[in-house]
Image (cartoon, rainbow, N blue to C red):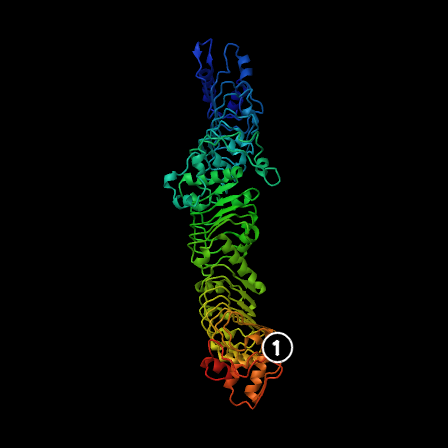
Amino acid sequence: WMDEVLAAAAEDVPPEATLVYLKNWIRARGSVPMKKTGTGVLDLRALGLGHMPKEVSDLQWSGHQHRHDDMTNLAHIRLDHNPIAELPPVIKAWYCVKSLSLNNCMLRSVPPALGIMEHVACLERFEACDNGIRTMQVAPGTFTALKHLYLDRNDFTVLPLELGWMSSLEVLSLKENKILHVPASSWRMRNLRKLHLDKNHVQRLCPELGALGSRFPDPSTVNMESHLEKEGPELDYVTRPPGSGIPQMPPDQKRVSAWRKHCGGLEGDGESEYGVLEELTFSGNLAIWSPPPEVLEQELPYSMRYLRSLFDARHTHSLDLHDMKLLRMPPEVLELAWSLLHLYLNNNELTTLPICVEELSCLQTLHLHHNRITRLPPTVGLCLTELTDLDITYNEMTRLPLEFGNLKKLKKFEVGNNPWDMIADETVGQGTKSLIRFLQAVKDSVHGILDVQDMAISSYGLTFVKRAIPDASKIYDVNMDDNVIKMIPKSLHVLTAVVSLSINRNKLRELPEWLPVYDNLQVLQCSTNHLTSVMDEIGDIPTLVRLTLDSNFIKQIPNTFSSLTNLETLRLDSNQLECLNPAIGFLEKLRKLTLDMNELTCLPPEIALCTSLRELSFEGNAIKSPPREVILNGPPGVLRYQARLLAGKTQLDMQLNELGLYHVPFEITYMSNITRLNLDNNRLRDLWPVAPLPPFCERDKAVIVGGGY
């Protein structure tokens, strides 16, 4: 058993090494003949050993060579500072060995023989620093007793994927290597208390390390007041403390967990527990990007919480990254696109979201409040159509992508406390459905139709509507019915292509004087408002075909109505008209005229000039002229009577024959210049004109004869 020492001595090794070797062996194993008890510590450091002697690697064989001494009771083996290049492939009878140190040797790999439980059942500490180790073979069932592993200053670039099977490990030191990442199986090392990854090439700390963490921020130091007021999620690191069971692994959309396959598989759902990691160091990794630099700048508990959140999201479908001072959405979020339902990024320093957020197509909850967001990508509205809860309050947004109108499933949409220039406060206060309808209406305006009906929009809110419109020059149909508009702001003059404008059931007090800039306007509907008059400029819109002014407080119409020569429908019912302007006679294309529920007493004879008139209604008025028997004949009879009155007034020849009159109309007494009066074929009982009750007044006379307006 001294062959190795003798061979080394021939290579100019100082002869004292042989004595040191022998003495250390005797101290370690003891000697029955010499009556010495062994210390159990075999110290063979710096003896020039080129490889591990067989008497060390096979203690059972060594015991047979020394029949009186038991070699298997060794507890600690030290082989530091020897030029050992490799370890033997087979190690036997290390039944009591608890520690092995091979620092500053020339090793290139660690064989799996060190982890075989049959021969190395008690190895708790293994040191192999300052070597050139590149690989370490770990398999299920190996290194199960190992608690301390030191592999500093080696050449590791990749750690074994099965690293997590060393489930008893408490301290793992991998300083000054070339490690790029930590394997996902590390979540199985639930007893790990210290992990050192300083001065490596690590670019990302895997989320599985979050399952090992036990140090998290004190909940009392986290600003959660506003978050909890909005019924935000509980703090996961409080509700699931270290040592608690991991929740059941959920299936993805394909019913196969991609993460389960990636990390080597779970033996059973909830089989593991959260770890007890207290110390994690990774300084000197200059290329690290996960956790983000802004998280790393804070204390370790925030980094551990970040990793824990990513790990938990695989089980809970919910990712809580609030209050971490994040400057951007972490790219790791996209790795959870297959299952993520709830995402909380509130109370951070975000300025926007990446366009690739579209991949989170299953997302139902997205909280972004209390950030510095100035804009959001339209892909949120185009692809995240499953959203039911979206909160973007307390940001710096001025415009919202119109594509958000596609989010039909939203039940809660909070957008308050932003400096909006396209959404009025009144629209925000109307709730989620109204806000979505508003965005959808503005979005659809690119097709030429702007429909903001029943959205509680005021005159002030209309200025925001104008700012929200993508292209005002394409809009030809505007519907603003059922709002609270008192006046139309001048900023809407940019809608130069408008053909139809509907403002029914509002609180409009007057029509704007600039309305004629709509030089293509054909339909103007202002029913059920608070109009008391019609501006003279209405005559500057000769393109009008339909004009509805019913259910207002209009007392008269201006003379400029005579310019509306293309008008076909005019509704003036339910107003306060006392007389109808004779200018109505210039509306040659007028087909429908409604004058119901006014204060009219006489119809002007000039109404007979409306030769295209087919529908005339004036019920609910105290009409004195024409007489009642003429009114009973319907609109044709009324128009025929009015036409004859007009002819008598202009030609001095009054033909009132065949009209079914019971009395001579009193209004002819005002026409003192007529030269002929024909009353044939009527039902006259006498020739005395009968004055109506109440009797005619000067206003009535002015309507019939003319003048006096």
Residue 475 shows up from this direction: no
Which residue is at a point 50% across and 79% down the rendered structure image?
A: 581
Badge 1: residue crowd in 10 Å (few <14, some 14–19, many ≥20):
some
Which residue is most to the left?
A: 220
- The kind of secondary structure element at disc 1 is loop
Q: Which residue is mark 1?
A: 612
Relative placement, left or right, of 19 versus 648 is: left
Relative placement, left or right, of 529 versus 654 is: left
The one of 346 and 37 positioned closer to us in this rendering: 346
The one of 277 and 39 positioned closer to us in this rendering: 277
The one of 568 and 280 positioned closer to us in this rendering: 568
Image vertical order of residue 244 relative to residue 405, above or below: above
The one of 518 and 196 positioned closer to us in this rendering: 518
- Provide residue 605's location: percent of width, then percent of height: 55, 81
Relative placement, left or right, of 655 versus 202 is: right
| Three-letter amino acid code of the residue under disc 1 | Ser
- Provide residue 7's location: percent of width, then percent of height: 54, 22
Which residue is at a point 54% across and 56% down the rendered structure image?
A: 403
Among the 4 quarters of the image, the one containing residue 637 = bottom right
- Provide residue 134's location: percent of width, then percent of height: 54, 34
Work out which quarter of the rendered image holds the N terminus and state it: top right
Q: What number of labels is visible?
A: 1
Image vertical order of residue 440 relative to residue 173, above or below: below
Residue 537 shows up from this direction: yes
- Provide residue 570's location: percent of width, then percent of height: 55, 72
